Image: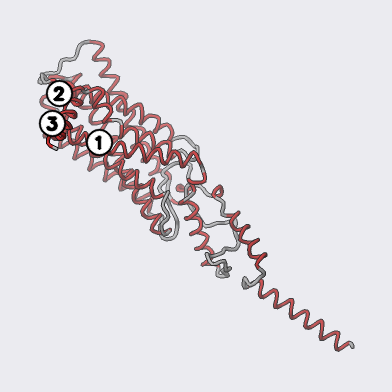
Amino acid sequence: MSKGRGLKELMAKGKRIAAKGMHNKGMRPKGLISEDISRNEKDLDCSHYSIHSRPNEHSSTAMNTRGRFNKDINRTERFNDSMDCKRLGNKILCNFTGVTLSWVIICVAILGIIGNILSLIVLIRKYKRSPKVLLLTTLAMTDLCFLFFTIMEQAMTHIGLEVSIHSAWKFSFGILASYCNIITIWMVVLVTIDRFIHICMPFKALSLCTRKSTVGQIISMVTFCTVFVTILFTIMLKDVNLTEHCWFLGLDFHSQFIEKTSAVPLYVYHVFAYAIPPIAIAIFNLLMLHQVCKCKPVEEGMPSIDDKQVSYILITISISSLCLILPSAILQFMFERDLKNTVTIFLVMNSSINFVIYNVVGTRFRNKLLKLWCGRQNVN
């Protein structure tokens, strides 16, 4: 009897060991598996993720798409990082305000693209080739590029692609949008300086603000901005690997981006993009206002009504840009999360509002646009 009892105990012990082995291999009953799945889904809730992704530190195990457990630690970490990327790609969808702002940005940017295309057509076909028109044409082109890349960056949040492709493309569009945004902001500074010279130094305007000098200024500004920002990006992104981390462009002081790079280039970037331009625009506008109040400005060599209309348009663009860039600059330096879309919508409005200014301030522009449209209608 003792032998029989010992044999039964040995068999029971073997069953327990076998059951434990099945448990470790992921061959447990269906109810236990579903329980772990729900627990894992809870760990992967969107609220656990910030702007940037990193391997999930809360989950000790991971489940693949077929519902089987993975015992390999490296594969588990890679899987958790992929799940982070997928959740990060849809993070904005977990927040109603965030997704609403994102779609508002896309809609405003689309309208801005249409407006800038119409502006380019009118400026190129209906206005004479003056330095002021050249500035407006270049500004419309940079606005167009910025709006396009912003739409692509925002759209990447709402479409499901392979994780590595998704993060790389979104990151690239964000980088290109940053280049165009900085060039656009500094183009407004050039526009303000041009108006300052014409209003405060009218007798030097004919020699300083020629078409050739304007082209040189634009090329120099674009080259300097591109080289300078490229150097900053190279320093900031040298330790970032898109194939290992799901990094999204979030150049702010409060993000995990600083953990992977030096904060000094980041501060320089924000000062160059969002601090110096608004200050320069404000100073030049105050000087112009002072000159206008002190005495009526005399602009030699500007008898044309078109030139006067363009001058009014340039001044209005300068003031409106200051009103839209300044809040963006303030928000960039605030230590609050989830402000990226709020900043972006100000910048998108700055690049989209010029067409409205052309039509409201420039009656000649509006007439030329209607004439161009009516001419096409008659041809058809």
Q: Give coordinates of residue 170: x percent, y percent.
A: 38, 51
**Residue highlighted by disc 1:** 116
Q: Give coordinates of residue 79: x percent, y percent.
A: 51, 63
Q: Amino acid at mark 1?
A: Asn
Residue 198 in view (yes/no)? yes
Q: Is residue 67 left or right of residue 251?
A: right
The residue tagged with tag 1: helix, strand or loop?
Answer: helix
User: First in sequence: mark 3 or mark 2?
Assistant: 3
- Seen at 56% across and 69% down, the residue is 70
Q: Amino acid at mark 3?
A: Lys
User: First in sequence: mark 1 or mark 3?
Assistant: 1
User: First in sequence: mark 1 or mark 2?
Assistant: 1
**Quarter of the image with the C terminus in it:** top left
Q: In which image quadrant can residue 11 be found?
A: bottom right
**Residue highlighted by disc 3:** 126
Of 257 and 159, nearer the camera is 159
- Seen at 63% across and 72% down, the residue is 27
**Residue highlighted by disc 2:** 307
- Seen at 53% across and 60% down, the residue is 80
Q: CA distance from mark 1 to mark 2?
A: 20 Å
